[in-house]
Amino acid sequence: MSDLLVKIRGLKLEGRSDETWNPIINGVDLDLHKGEVLGLIGESGAGKSTLGLAAMGFCRDGVRISEGTVEFDGIDLIKASAAVKRDLLGKRIAYVAQSAAASFNPAHQLIEQHVEAPVQHGVRGKSESAEDGIELYRKLRLPNPDEIGFRYPHQVSGGQLQRAMTAMAMACRPDLIIFDEPTTALDVTTQIEVLAAIREIVEEFNTAAIYITHDLAVVAQMADQIKVLLKGDEVETSDTRSMLSAPKEDYTKSLWAVRSFERPLKAPVVAGATPVVSIRNVDAAYGKVPVLHDVSFDMHEGRTVAVVGESGSGKSTTARCITGLLPPTSGEILFDGQPLPSDYRKRNKDQLRQAQMIYQMADTALNPRVSVGNIIARPVQFYSGLSGKELRKRVDHLMDQIELPADQYYNRLPSELSGGQKQRIGIARALAADPKFIICDEVTSALDQLVAEGILRLLARLQDELSLSYMFITHDLATVRAIADEVVVMKDGRVVEQGPKQEMFQPPHHPYTDLLLSSVPEMDPDWLSNLLAERGVDNIGDAASEKI
Amino acid sequence: MIWFIFALIVMAGLAWCLRYAGQLASGNAPMFRDMSFGVAFGYVLGIVILVWLAWAYTQALSDDPAVANKFFFLKAAIEWFIIFAIAAFAFKMFGQYVGTDGSRKLFRSMPLTASFGLLTILVYIIVAIFAGVIAPYGQDEILQGVAANVVAGGDPALGGDPNYPLGTDQIGRDILSRLIYGAQNTVGIAFVTTLLAFFLGGTFGFLAAVLGGWLDQVLSRMVDVLMAIPSLIFALLLMTIASVWANQWGIPLTYFMIVIIAVIDSTRVYRLARAVGQNIVVMDYIEAAKLRGEGLVYLMFKEILPNATAPLLAEFGLRFCFVFLTIAALSFLGVGIQPPLADWGTMVRDLAGFINYAQFAPSAAVTPLLAAGAIALLTVAVNFVVDWMLHKSSGLKE
């Protein structure tokens, strides 16, 4: 076809580590026509971003193209000189990065950064570009489009910044935009706004796009075609509808199947049973800024309470109150019916032992200089005073429980483990204290879907074996569906709704719960269009959230 | 001035020609095609400097002493540069074939500068430890029947003596022996001082990072006050006071010097330890340890210290250089290491007058420069190693 915009043939990329070149992409073909959106999906390390950048003829430091061709509109980008590429990039090819907050220069206003590319490429003069920018802001439905450009990056919200970044990419009306996980760092309610805005503007200017993400439901809304990558190899490519309805390869099917994990419902709590942890009318503040208002809920033995809400809703702050890192300004926390001292320094060893925590980022939760075995051994030794052979036996047992055999993993450092394995070590460290209650703070949100499911299954199994109570903090409703027994929905430091899972997922909902539930992308390519038709463009995302 | 501008223009022209020729010869390879003019100019400038050095070297070999003397030091520099480069390369090769798997891998990935630095430090350590065995004479031994101020080089025609290859000083002591003992005194004292500075600065820095609050405020403001006073002048002032106490109590002044320099330098270490510690304290694993109920000492030395070793070790190298230079400077000013102990700073001061002879008799002027060279060489070597360690610890690999 004559309108072929990007043509990649047999592309191989290599990355340098440990003094040798290792393959990252092993011979991928890619065709992108004008005005078409291609979704690139895969787990982390699959080479999505590297391939996306290679489509611009660009390699990160320590990466090189070893074989293959990349043609953009008939121009060979691999052989092209720096001058030719300089002319193309920014003008005909643009890039939208995952973290808009890290990509904008914090020292300049948005509009100043917006006009740079068109002025540099001689597309438009400075004032015309600024006017055009305001026009684009309006099209992307940013609030106050006339003046938002004159703010600095820190003065606008994450979702708005991501849209401003899209506007900036659009400044020269490029033929191709590469979106690298543009909504991954955003809340569901914010994500939906950005998705709607991106889709609309890409359609309006008939821009071709490569949309990189690991979220299948998101890509289903955005892409005409989907390409699945696994460890640098293409698994399959087809148009979105047939990919969703009839995936061919096993790997693709397994990706689709991930969301099917769901625990059986448990019998309701016996009336009058003492909850393991009970939060009673807790208020808390950071300095003088109040963040929690009258939060109360109970957690019972052997059950999981999922706390959901967008970032800033007070989920993690509630956890900090329970652990005693942030003493509440009023209210109390009961453990087995007994009040806990509000400051962790005043709690005794046994009280500290009973409540453990698993963190979101396993990278920062494990000391990188301590071996896995010692990480797990320390709490055992600290609380139970075991030593020598008995200590080792206990650690071995714990490592068996998390399915990482001690003979292979005992002496490894955290940096020698994968993300999922690190998270398992975090779980083992919590178990090592032999607790009754564990706080899981977004434990799966940094993991790939397949790995995350493994962690959820492990947690579920441990709960059944040890009758643990979990407080499961998450913003992902699919996870809630999979693992929760009770759900607590929080917004702006308040509990807006709580109850057993089966009731929470059935109408009638509190309007905010309804907004949250309706904002979760589904694997239906028409979902976004239907939702927009149903609710109207002004009734989604942050705008809707503020009205509640 | 006109010549200078003319040379620049010629070089600019050459740079353009170089790039164009490269493009033609290599069939427009990316290296020449995307080469900016500044880079091409840099290549030309480098070539011009190399040519000038080669020309200067031939000048130094000239029969006319007036011409040869002008380039005497340049010639020595070029020769030593080549010798050091070869030694470093040989050391690196040696390391690649001897030792454990880990050390061999380390040597393979090591840049030449780092292997030069390591080799130099190793040599200094050996010399310092075995000074008594290596040195031909004692450090304070005034050689009987030998003239003072024997010139280095050992050539009797130029006023040297083959028995004293580096000559003798103003009261007839062997300079080679004093240099060797100087390594022991200067380097040894500097090492102890740096260790003490790190112990003080590191402990208080971590303490401030973990506890924060008023303790952090008090410590930090105290450190600010100490840092506000120029360190060398402050050290001089304290040394003057200490010299009175040293006499009264009969404690050698050197001990006072160690403590004074350690305290002054520990302020810099404190700042670093506190900054690094604060970055580590916010990590979740510290929070986990706190929630476990761990004590302060465990937090500081088991959780924080292992993660702060890379920057602290790098700082140790640099701080060692500064301490070492401070000691040399204090000795040069006459309040540091006391005679008759040999020390490089004092040696430079005692023989400084000979530098005036450089133009007429370069080998006479070498005498004070030997000690200065020993200081400079160690400083450069330590910095090379530190750079390399920083590079490794920052994870910036190519």
Image: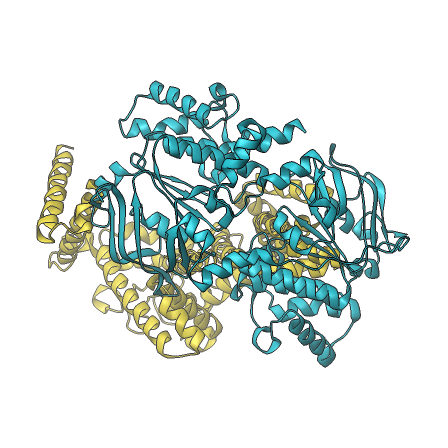
Q: Looking at the image, what colour scheme do you see?
A: by chain
Going 68% across and 35% down the picture, which residue do you hit?
Answer: A512
- Residue A5 is left or right of residue A441, and the answer is left
Q: Residue at x 70, y 53 (%)?
A: A484
Residue at 23% over, 42% down: A73
Instruction: Check the rendered structure and report the hue given to chain B.
Output: yellow
**Residue at left offset 66%, top offset 52%:** A481
Looking at the colours in the rendered structure, which chain would you say is drawn in cyan? A
Drawn side of residue A344 relative to residue A175, left or right? right
Q: Position of residue A476 (x, y in %)?
A: 61, 48
The one of B113 and A340 positioned closer to us in this rendering? A340
Specify whether A7 is left or right of B286: left
- Residue B119, horizontal then vertical, whole percent: 38, 68
Front-lying residue, B57 or B6:
B6
A176 is higher (above) or lower (below) than A131: below
Q: Is residue A157 visible?
A: yes
**In the rendered image of this protein, does residue B278 appear above or below residue A285?**
below
Residue B225 visible here: no
Q: State the image quarter where residue B173 is shown.
A: bottom left
Q: Does residue A20 appear left or right of residue A184 in this picture?
A: left
Which quarter of the rendered picture does the C terminus of chain B lie within? bottom left
